[in-house]
Structures are given as structure tokens and as C-alpha cells.
Amino acid sequence: MLFELILLAATILLLLKLLMAKPDKFPPGPTKWPLVGNIFQLKRWGPLPHLSLGEAARQYGDVVGLYSGYTPVILISSLDGIKEVSSRDELAGRPTSLVQTKIDKGDYGVIMSSGERWKEQRRFTLRHLRDLGFGKRSLEGIAHEELEVVFEEVEKLSRGEKADQKNPVCVHDILGTAGINVLWHIISGQRYSHSDPYLNKLMDNVKKLISISDPSGGVSVVFPIFTTLFPFWTNLPTFLELRRSLHQFIKDEIVGHRKTIDSENPRDFLDIYIAEIDKQSINPATYFKEKQLVQTCVDLFMAGSDTTFNSLTFSVLYMILYPEVQCKVQEELDRVVGRDRLPSLEDRPNLPYVEATLHEVLRLSSVAPLALPHSPLYAEKDIEFQGYVIPKNSRVILNLYAVHHNPEIWGDPHNFRPERFLDEDGKVTKPEALIPFGTGKRACLGEALARNNLYLFFTGLVQRYSMRIPDGHPIPSDDPEGGLTLVPKAFKVDFQTRV
Ligand code: HEM
């Protein structure tokens, strides 16, 4: 009996050892527990993923090896590590998701696709979106129209019951659709009214979809079997329903465009892409298919709406928390632009303090704190990285937040101090450690649009209003909420029109 017990104990120990084993040269990290990997340690280390992963880096260094269930997760927190991952072709993949393998049977779109499909689709999308006005002045008119609507909303919401009474306004209520209308105009030539129930439902669905997306992969990575056996215990059904409604919205637009398209004179991105699908229809190997177009549009929506809104909301929050910066921005705008017209993209090079302030907004807020997960491109090959091994099925997380908050780089990373981006002559500098849009091969495709939108909306608001914490209200916290993207908690602002 004793012998059997010893044998059983030895077998269990051996099994545990096997289940807890890590590959040779796996980066340092906490003990890997059977089945769950490190998910409980991570939960204990911080309420939001960028905080718990920050703690992992503090304990184990700039390259950490973790496990989400049995999936290896490699966390990179140094600037040189992030630059290296982002510049190496074999690390330019994205992890395969359950939706890709089980539902779509392929990796469509731009965000989560890899290899040749991604290269071709990214190039095509970027080229045509640029031609349609991503980084150009044609975008300015649309942004200015949107800004006028934001002004009307501010005026309406802040009007009190008596003539001399003003109500504080919740910033989340006025900026919700600002950026998305500019993007949607470029994609489909359409613009929605801010109160349009369809647009608001759509934005709501995008937000919900982003909020249930976990950068470390969530249940589908930790317990893939759960999503097959007990899907109702996971958020998979919600995810699929939200995704279906977004797909349907784009499909309806495509049907509408097909009815009125003139392929010689494309009006927008949908027309250009539909013409390419028709041109390539005789090529059996083409990636230009309607399913690809639908997912690309959903990707642009997902990547472009929340991030722009969140950055803009942070910019207003910092202006009320740092009124001395707000005054300096207003002084520069008054001197260079005046108050009779809205700031234009042409003014931008002459507004170094504004530019430095926007750099600081993007750095301190780090609205995409962990970028998007990368992965080894070739399923058959592990990768050597800075003396370690990145196993072939890993998720590689780039901790942009850690770089933006590293005291060795910035000195006082937690202060909002635009001056750090100005040289002795008052000219704007852009240190290489400022990487809110990522860097290298998979860097953000919408950077030009995002920067221009942020500039136009921010300067328009600061030029028109003095913004401050409403009397009697507590100082709002700049601790964000979110996960994949970060946003300030709801806060109110007293908008005083400048005379
Ligand atoms: C302030 C606003 C924005 C920020 C901070 C931001 C940040 C990022 C980051 C960090 C990545 C991941 C980089 C990586 O994986 O290495 C990314 C990817 C991406 N972004 Fe943005 N983004 C913003 C706005 C936009 C907008 C407006 C669009 C669309 C019009 C957009 C489209 C994309 C796409 C399609 C990708 C995936 C690129 C690929 O996988 O090749 N983003 N963005």
C-alpha cells in the first residue's frame, strides 16, 4: 500500500513538473501553474492589464515570459525591445483567434491578418485612404463642420434654467461621434447627425466590442475548451452578436454603393475597393473579396473611433487639471491664429506649444497602452530574441505605457509638462521614445488622420472656451479605465465662452 502511495505521489509530482515546465531559454517570469498559467498572479498585480503587466516588468525585467493558460505571452517593456520586435519581419504576425479558426476560416481585415494578405491589404488601404484625405486638408472642412456641432452641443447642454446660470457638461457626451464621422466620411462619403440613433447604436457596439476584448487574449486563450463546450459562460455570444451587427452595417453600405457606383469616378474608399474586387474577380488567388472589405472597414472603425475619442477626452481633462498649460495654448493660438477663424492644418507648423501639448497628451494618456498583440509569423519556427526564445505560438505584448512612463527616459513621467518636447529655441522635438502609435511594420495605419483630428478638435475647443473644473466639484482623477484602450472616467467641465 505504501509503495502504491509513493508511486502515486511520484506520478503526480512528475505530471506537475511536466505541466509547469517552460521551454529552454524562455524569458524570466513567475511560476507557471497548470491549466491557468499566470492569470491569477496578473489579476493580483493590478486591476487593469497595463498595470499588472507593469508590475510583472518591475519584478522580472524588460523581457518577461508569462502564460495565459498554456499560451506563452512574452512581455516587452523597453524601447529597444519594442523597436526590435516591430522591425523584424518574423515578428510581424498577429495571434490567431478563435473567430479566425472556427468562424471566419481565415484571417480577414488588416488588424488581425498576417503574411501576404496583410501586406497587400495594408498597402492598398493606406495608399487609398491617404489619397482620399487622411493626412490632407480636405479632411479639415469635415472636421470643422463636426466641431461646430460639438460647439452647439456644449451650448445646449451648458444652458441653465436661468439666463445667468450655466450647467457643467460631461465631456463624454459631446465628443462621442466627433472623430468617427470624419473617418466614416472618407470610407463611405456619408456623415451622420450626432443624435442619429443608428450612429449612436453603432458607436455603442464598437465601444462594447472593444471593452470585452482583452489584450492578453481572454478566456478563448486561457481556456479554449470553454468557448467550445460552454460558450454561454464566456463573452463569445455577446462578441459575435456585436460583430454581426457591425458587419451588417457595412454590408448594407456596400449594397447601397453598388447601386450607384461609377468605377471611373470613385467617390470614396468603398467605391475604390468594390472596383478592385470586380477587377480581380477573374483572379482565383485574389484577396480582394467582399468579406475582406467588410472586415477592413470594421477594423478601421474599431481602431479609429475609440482611440481618437479617448485621446481627445484626455486632452480636455489635462487642460482642466493643468490650467497654466491651457493658458499658454490659448496665448499661442491668439497670437498665431486670432479668434476670428478656426485653427487650420496650415497653422500647425507655427504652433509649437500646441504640438508639444498634443505630444504630451499622447504620451501621458497612452490610450493604446499595450498596442496590439504581435506573434511569430511562421507557425513552425521559434524565434531568438535578445538571448531568449520566443516560442512559435506566443502572443508578444508591447508595453508602450511602460516606455511612456519610464523615469529613466522622461525624468518626471507622471507630470503633464509639454515643455519636455520643446528645445532651447522653442522648436518641437519628437524623441524616439514617444511611440503612442507603435513603430515599425505594424505601426498604426491611421496615425496621420488621428493626429490631424486631435489637433483640429483640440485647438478648436481651446480657442473657443476656457475650460475649468466646475465650482464645488471634486478634482477629477486622471486614473483611466478600460483595458485594450484607456479612457478617463466620466468628468464634468465648466465651459466659459471666451470673449
Ligand atoms: C490617437 C489615436 C490612435 C492611437 C493612439 C493608435 C494607436 C495604435 C497602435 C498602438 C497600434 C498597434 C501597433 C502595433 O501593433 O505595433 C495601432 C494599430 C492600428 N491602427 Fe491605430 N491608433 C489611433 C488611431 C487610429 C485611427 C484613426 C485609425 C483608422 C483610421 C487606426 C487604424 C489602425 C489600424 C488599422 C491598425 C492595425 C495596423 C496593422 O496591424 O498593420 N488607428 N494603432
Image (spheres, grey):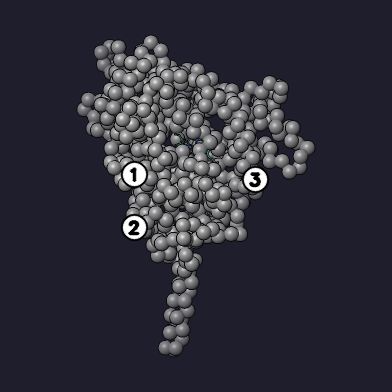
Q: Is mark 2 within 8 Å of ligand 1?
A: no
Q: Nearer the viewer, residue 498 or 443?
A: 443
**What element does badge 1 sit on?**
helix
Q: Nearer the viewer, mark 1 or mark 3?
A: 1
Task: Give the mark, 1 or 2, whose residue is nearer the N terminus.
Answer: 2
- Residue at 62% x, 42% y is 119
Name the residue rendered at 51%, 33% in the picture.
446
Say few, some or many: other residues with alpha carbon within 10 Å of mark 1 (under 14 / 14 to 19 / 20 or more).
Answer: few
Q: Nearer the viewer, residue 313 or 253?
A: 313
Q: Which one is earlier in the sequence, the residue at label 3 or at label 2?
A: 2
Disc 3 element = helix
Residue 411 vs 331, above or below: the answer is: below
Name the residue beneath numbered marker 1.
409
- Kind of residue at disc 3: Glu
Q: Position of residue 18 (x, y in %)?
A: 48, 72
**Residue type indicated by callout 1:** Ile
- In which quadrant is the N terminus drawn? bottom left
User: Is 36 situated left or right of 125 in this image?
Assistant: left
What distance separates the C-alpha of mark 1 from that of mark 2?
Answer: 19 Å
* Quarter the C terminus occupies: top left
In the rendering, which numbered label is found on residue 59? 2
Left or right position of 121 against 390: right
Taking the view exactly as shown, the residue that stands out farthest to the front is: 425
Residue 172 makes an appearance in the image: no
